[in-house]
Image (spheres, rainbow, N blue to C red):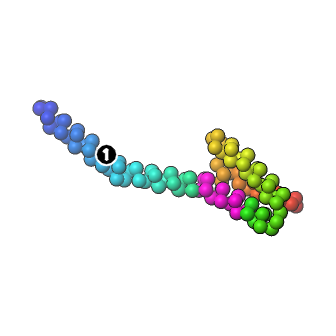
């Protein structure tokens, strides 16, 4: 068997696989990553910031300050590879809730 048809077949298969990968797989993986970041980080951070904004809007600067302190500590740990905000934003909000 001559090597030319084998080489051409391999090259055509490689090009086809590259086109499919760039057209289908890569955009899908980017979308999945964006959705993951949105759910893990952005929603948790947004929840914390809205609650701190409410505290500050009520004029309770001590409460807002305490919440921001805990938020900054947890966010620093998140940036070092710790748990995402979705896991700890409730802790920030609960920082200044009155005990039941």
Question: Which residue is drawn at the image coordinates 79% and 58% (left, top)?
Answer: 64
Camera-side residue: 83 or 66? 66
**Magenta span includes 31:** no
Q: Visible in this render: residue 94?
A: no
Determine the secondary structure under disc 1: helix
Q: Is residue 41 above or below residue 14?
A: below
Q: Position of residue 73 (x, y in %)?
A: 73, 46
Quarter of the figure with the N terminus:
top left
Q: Position of residue 81 (x, y in %)?
A: 63, 41
Question: Which residue is drawn at the image coordinates 64% and 40% (left, top)?
Answer: 80
Name the image quarter holding residue 57.
bottom right
Question: Which residue is drawn at the image coordinates 34% and 53% (left, top)?
Answer: 23
Q: Which residue range is magenta in the image?
A: 39-51
Q: Residues within 10 Å of mark 1 (few under 14, many from 20)?
A: few
Count of numbered labels shown in the rendering: 1
Camera-side residue: 63 or 26? 63
**Drawn side of residue 12 relative to residue 39, left or right:** left
Per the image, the residue denoted by label 1 is 18
Q: Position of residue 90 (x, y in %)?
A: 73, 56
């Amino acid at each position: 068997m001559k090597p030319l048809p084998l080489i051409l077949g391999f090259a055509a298969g490689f090009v086809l696989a590259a086109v499919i990968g760039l057209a289908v797989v890569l955009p899908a993986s980017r979308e999945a990553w964006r959705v993951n970041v949105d759910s893990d980080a952005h929603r948790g951070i947004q929840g914390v910031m809205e609650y701190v904004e409410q505290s500050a809007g009520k004029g309770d600067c001590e409460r807002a300050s305490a919440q921001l302190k805990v938020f900054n500590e947890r966010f620093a740990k998140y940036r070092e590879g710790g748990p995402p905000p979705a896991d700890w934003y409730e802790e920030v909000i609960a920082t200044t809730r009155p005990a039941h």
